[in-house]
Image (cartoon, rainbow, N blue to C red):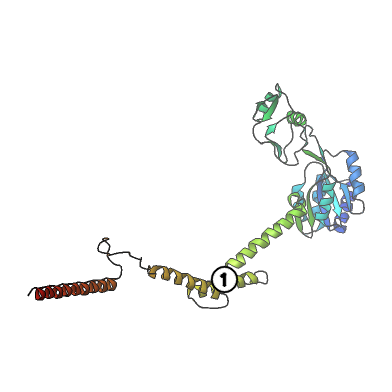
Amino acid sequence: MVSKKKIQELKEVKELLKKHPVIGILDMHGLPARQLHSIRNMLRGEATIRMVKKRLISLAFKESGLDGIEKLSEMIRGEPALLLSNTNPFRLARKIDSAKSKAFAKAGDIAPHDIIVKAGPTPLPPGPAIGELQRLKIPAGVEGDKIAVKQDTIVAKEGEEISPELAGLLAKLGIEPMEIGLNLIAAWENGIIYNKDILFVPPEKYIEDLKAAHARAFRLAFSIGYYTKENITLFLQKAHREAVALALDREIPTKYTIKQLLAKANAEKNALKSKLQIKEPETVSGDSKESGQEPENPEEGKNNQETGNQEEQKTETSEETGSSSQEEKKE
């Protein structure tokens, strides 16, 4: 038989659920009383923490009539408590996260995330510590005067219980995997449940994701020829470049192509001129026949030959005239 006290507590919890638009599930395991008191003061006026047993929480969710809130029952673990607030769950999560501090793990603690021992040198000197590392399947060796871990190793996955041996080793390595603060597992708002992986994403990550999405959408729109006010300038620039390239290929003079076309024509003219250029004849001294060289100008050689023949004929005539004169004198 259910006691009146439990019935009254159930009634109070259901009323609190209906009064607050944001309802979160907390795991209070390992949270020191001093930190809890400090967090309560920090959240004063924004959120209320109510310690309630798991069975009573599930029953209150079921009887509350709130859309989809029963799914929160599946996320209850550890030492549960309710977080009741009127504040946006993401703003609330950031405030909770800012109040957390690092701490060493104790035996029986639940890993809040994957605990990784990074590769590299450790503060441990050679000795029995190598055996401790190997028992926990952490590859290690001696480098100089220290023990070094050879590769990154996950020693505990999120949600796993930390053994006494692992807790001791992590303390020796100076690793503080625990976070002292409220462990907000999930939050419900207007029928939507946000788990911790979403709630505690840094605001900068959302901005980066939005920028990346915009860049992908921009590239897609440009590649399929979808015009928007963001990409129309690029489309016009592309069209202009293609029009200029086509005009140059077809040698169509425009104010954008005239300089290139004139430069091209000038280059072609110079190339043709160099192919058709005729060398000037060299000056020849003396008789070309005696020097063994043929005259470069055939007409000039022919004229020279005719002039020589005429001179020879004159000489022969003069000789004949002289011979005739001598014979007349003898007679």
Residue 269 or residue 262, whichever sits in front:
269
Give the residue at the far top of this rendering: 127
Residue in the foreground of this view, choosing between 243 and 62: 243
Q: SS class of the residue under badge 1? A: helix
| Residue 189, percent from left and from top | 80, 58
Give the image quarter of residue 205.
Answer: bottom right
- Judging by the rendered image, the residue that carries numbered circle 1 is 241
Q: List the single residue furthest toward the left.
A: 331
The image shows a total of numbered marks equal to 1
Q: Quadrant of the N terminus?
A: top right
- Left or right: residue 251 versus residue 143 is left
- Is residue 60 visible in the rendered image? The answer is no
Up the image or down, 265 lies above or below 219; here it is below
| Residue at position x 28%, y 74% in the image | 299
- The image shows residue 132 at horizontal and vertical percentages of 70, 26
Q: Residues within 10 Å of mark 1 (few under 14, many from 20)?
A: few
Can you give x and y, in whole percent of width and height, for residue 329 in the image?
11, 75
Dividing the image into 4 quarters, which one contains the C terminus?
bottom left
Q: What's under tag 1, amino acid-wise? A: Arg
Q: Position of residue 5 (x, y in %)?
A: 91, 46
User: Which of 47/61 is in front?
Assistant: 47
Residue 312 found in image quarter = bottom left
Depicted 39 relative to depicted 311: above or below: above
**Which residue is painted at 13% across and 75% down in the image?**
325
**In-front residue for pair 325/87:** 325
Q: Is residue 330 visible?
A: yes
